[in-house]
Image: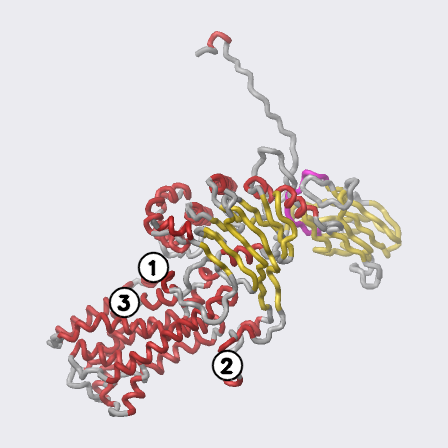
Amino acid sequence: MEHSNFLRAEIVIKPSQGWVPLKLGELWQYRELLVFLVWRDTKVRYKQASLGVAWAVIQPLMTMVIFSVIFGELAKLPSENIPYPLFSYAALLPWQLFSGALTRSGSSLVGNATLLTKVYFPRLIIPLSATIGGLVDFSISFLVLLGLMLFYGMAPTWAILWLPLLVVFTLVTALSVGLWLSALNVEYRDVQHIIPFIIQAWMYASPVAYSAELIPSGPWRFVYGLNPVAGIIQSFRWALLGASPPGELMLVSVGMVMILLVAGLYYFRRMEKVFADVV
Amino acid sequence: MGEIGIQVENLSKMYRIGTPQAQYKTLREALIGALKRPIYWLRNSPLATGHPETLWALREVSFEIKRGEVVGIIGRNGAGKTTLLKILSRITEPTEGRAVIRGRVGSLLEVGTGFHPELTGRENIYLNGAILGMTRREIKGKFDEIASFAEVERFLDTPVKHYSSGMYVRLAFAVAAHLEPEILLVDEVLSVGDAAFQKKCLGKMGDVAQEGRTVLFISHNMQAIRTLCKTALLLTDGRIEAQGDVHSVVNTYLCKGFRNIAERVWENLETAPGSEFIKIRSARIIPDTDNQDQVITVKTPFRIEFVFRLTLPEALFYIGFHFRSISGECIFVSASTPKVIRQGMHQNTCFVPGEFLNSGTYTLEVYFVKDGQVVLYQASDLLVFEVHEAEREPGSWLGEIPGAVRPKLKWDMAPVPISQPPGNRSQ
């Protein structure tokens, strides 16, 4: 079946002009490559680390401890009556998923330069696989969250059913920014120096250590929601710990991400033709 | 049959070449540019703005290849061969023109693309297969075949970083060799591995050609091109210089414009290379045959002539040549018989027999020596010359022949008479 399809295939090669079609169908044809790349990156990431996958747990756990001491104990930031360690850990989960995906996808094209210059496949696969690659870490650190909830005697609410959708939305958010960063990084290596800074600033702009409730409702809430991660984190706390529902914050975030994503996809496809020549 | 598999019309590719700084523009420049001319910047890639230095890697290339044809692409380095394959395999876009390809394309521009040193042989087979466009099921079906072709069955679960370079290359080629596209684009990948494996690869390429698949095949190995392909394309500076029957195209390539491959003359003795005792007037390498325009192949005898002026009144003198390979390794040394010469112009000629050097590029280091110990002048890389491949006897080794020299030695091969008594022969 598949073979006969290929037989009839006719490929026309010519310079592309104007806006390039996204060709998402072709992406689906190459889904196996996507899976292999995710698998490769995950496998390689922990292969030579003596603590291996434990790092997926150690990182958010240590950050949580530091946050709890500084922001919970010393600064006594309000945490909506949720134990502060749990409050910050539930935010660190999506934050690390997001920031990890962003870091990896930002440098993904440059890191896979040999593939870009030697083989054809839809280039979107590269930032996409880098984005998805954080799911394994996320799943592991999520188990730790369940343990923490048990320890603090907090039962999840029905809202937890939203979680899979929230995880997907987190990845989409990271991808929508990662597309821009990865494509820009091919031409301007400055980007890879900027990424760590972006991530640091972005964390303080997101309610990781503090509660989004600190932002007064009204127009400021709307502006705050332009940072999609704010909506995501608030939603995670709501779905897992029964914090206040994200509401309008999330609506603004979804709208923002959709705009970023579509623009990012087109920008990426447009720059794609020079990747192999410039990288 | 007769159906067109690949059709290329006026294909051109331009590269922008600038200084390294210009290639990666700084973000600041781009941002300022974007602020000044937002519309322009959005409509044109930032790369397209003002780097006047361009290079046409391919220029108006047109050809057609029938389904099932095996075509060799030849040309010197930088002629645009790889660029052509990169465009046809959709890795990079043409600047102008178009190409139509009918069928599933597999390209092999490098052996082992995407191999990861930390992963095991088994894992890399799957990963590399997927990268080359095979489905998981396809790879699974051919897994044993691939592993045995590569001769690495025992090390399948060892990370490939522990492989020897030979094993690594074998495994990489094995995966690629089992790709089954209808159209196969292959860059020079046969020059890897040891001789035995090269032979195996050539055999595999021959099989692919026999199976009726369309193959485009880049190589510098004229012998392999002649054997595997019926037709060939010769690219020169991005344009097609010749196409058609493989033998005539290869001959065009080998014979074109190589006269006086190595000749240098210094008219002004002031600026000529030399020392206070020696001034070189000219140095040249010419075929020692009737036809002096012919290219030097492994079969051609040639001579090396040096004309120089000695400023000493008299010296017991000789010239020594160090023949070096392109990597700088000294292959052998030859020197003239020491002789007393007087002040004035002299010519020294060294005769190098045919069927002695291997094909390849050689550099000549020259020593002008007095009394067997005083070096009057020494020059390295004054002459660089190339010994070309010649047509080999039918049945000769098809692959690259290793070694710095390829002397023709006396060989004898004869059947051994059967010594058994005639009565036993029927058994």
Residue B325 in the image, given as x and y percentages of width and height = 64, 50
- In which chain is the residue bearing label 3? A
Cβ atoms under marks 1 and 2 closer than 8 Å: no
Residue located farthest toward the top when viewing the structure as drawn: B423
Foreground: disc 1 or disc 2 = 2
With respect to residue A211, does B272 lie above or below? above
Foreground: disc 3 or disc 2 = 2
Start-end of magenta stretch? B353-364
Residue A93 in the image, given as x and y percentages of width and height = 25, 74
- In which chain is the residue bearing label 2? B
Quarter of the image with the C terminus of chain B is top left
- In which chain is the residue bearing label 1? A
What residue would you read off at disc 1? A31
Q: Observer-nearest residue: B260 or B254?
A: B254
Mark 2: amino acid: Ile
Disc 3 versus disc 2: distance between alpha carbons?
42 Å
Disc 1 versus disc 2: distance between alpha carbons?
36 Å
Q: Observer-nearest residue: A12 or B108?
A: A12
Q: Is residue B132 visible?
A: yes
SS under mark 2: helix
SS under mark 3: helix
Who comes first in sequence, dot 1 or dot 3? 1
Disc 1 versus disc 3: distance between alpha carbons?
21 Å
Q: Residue at x 78, y 44 (%)?
A: B292
What residue would you read off at disc 2? B39
Cβ atoms under marks 1 and 3 closer than 8 Å: no
Q: Is residue B120 visible?
A: no
SS under mark 1: helix
> Is residue B174 part of the magenta span, yes or no?
no
Q: Is residue B108 left or right of residue B55?
A: left
What residue would you read off at disc 3? A137
